[in-house]
Image: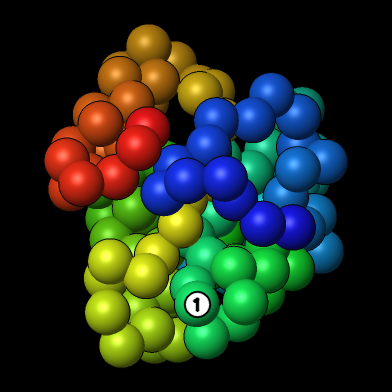
Amino acid sequence: MTTGGAAREVYSDHDFNLSRNCAHCGKRVQRDEEGRSIHPVLAITTRDTGHDGDEASTLCSQCLSDDGIESCFQGAMGHADDPADLRYIYQVLGVPEQQDMIRDFIHGLDNDFQI
């Protein structure tokens, strides 16, 4: 999977590699936990992986927090020399605070990117 710009909003879990483990908690990014559905919310691809979503550092909705986003970002940076080479795939999920967090993160990216 490739992205058309620096960030691309998607509306389905199937736009993510569902066999990936969360960069923060290490569990599958799509799962049921204690009667709740957990979904992937952020994937960060790199030029070194051909911007392939199959190899993306991915975050689950359970871990959508500042620390979780940092873990996902650091996981991606382990495969990239330049932060400008990162591409972001995301979906806005969770409670309102989490939805604001993912939007703020995406919109806070370098203004050189087309969002």
Relative to 13, say whether 46 is above or below. below
Which residue occupies the foreground of this view, 76 or 38? 76
Report x, y in % for residue 53: 68, 62
What amino acid type should be assigned to the residue bearing mark 1?
Answer: Arg
Residue 39 location, quadrant? top right
* Residue 59 visible: no
Residue at which label 1 appears:
47
Query: Is 99 situated left or right of 57 in this image?
Result: left
Residue at image coords 38%, 84%: 80
Which residue occupies the foreground of this view, 18 or 45? 45
Report x, y in % for residue 41: 55, 40
Residue at image coords 72%, 50%: 16
For label 1, the SS is helix
Residue at image coords 63%, 44%: 40
Query: Is 41 situated left or right of 112 in this image?
Result: right
Quarter of the image containing the N terminus?
A: bottom right
Quarter of the image containing the C terminus?
A: top left
Give the mark count.
1
